[in-house]
Image (cartoon, rainbow, N blue to C red):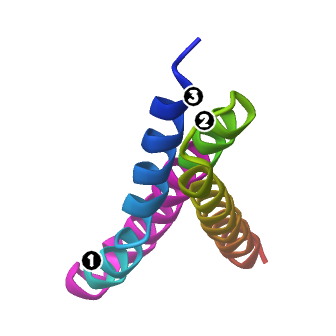
């Protein structure tokens, strides 16, 4: 089992790293040629969702484990899970929109 402080720290950093990934994804979608935009957009959203949810779950593991970095763990958990679920919903609704 990993140290709770280390889990809280890693979770916070992963959740925080997913925030600037959103504007980077938007910039990539604007810059790439028209045919690649959908693939870049879906792959980027999927990656952002994965990193954010992973960070949120790591921060939660640190919080449950009794970390001394309680505020960092709570912030990482909420930021990661909120951004991750939002990116997942955007990905799913884009796929639903493509299907119909």
* Mark 3 or mark 2: whose residue is earlier in sequence: 3
Image quadrant holding the C terminus, namely bottom right
Tag 1's secondary structure? Answer: helix
* Mark 1 or mark 2: whose residue is earlier in sequence: 1
Above or below 16: residue 73: above
Tag 3's secondary structure? Answer: helix
Residue underneath mark 3: 4
Q: Which residues are magenta?
A: 30-54
Residue underneath mark 2: 67
Image quadrant holding the N terminus, namely top right
Q: Quadrant of residue 34?
A: bottom left
State yes or no: residue 12 in magenta: no
Q: Does the residue at mark 3 contact the one at mark 2 (Cβ under 8 Å)? A: yes
Q: Quadrant of residue 77?
A: bottom right
Assess disc 3: are there few (<14), some (14-19) or many (≥20) residues with their C-alpha within 10 Å of its C-alpha: many
Q: Which mark is residue 28?
A: 1
* Mark 1 or mark 3: whose residue is earlier in sequence: 3
């Amino acid at each position: 089992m990993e140290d709770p402080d280390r889990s809280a720290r890693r979770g916070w950093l992963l959740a925080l790293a997913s925030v600037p990934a959103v504007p980077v994804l938007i910039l990539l979608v604007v810059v790439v040629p028209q045919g690649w935009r959908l693939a870049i957009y879906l792959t980027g959203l999927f990656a952002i969702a994965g990193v954010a949810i992973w960070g949120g779950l790591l921060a939660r593991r640190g919080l449950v484990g009794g970390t001394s970095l309680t505020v960092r763990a709570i912030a990482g958990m909420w930021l990661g899970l909120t951004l991750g679920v939002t990116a997942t919903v955007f990905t799913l609704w884009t796929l639903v929109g493509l299907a119909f």
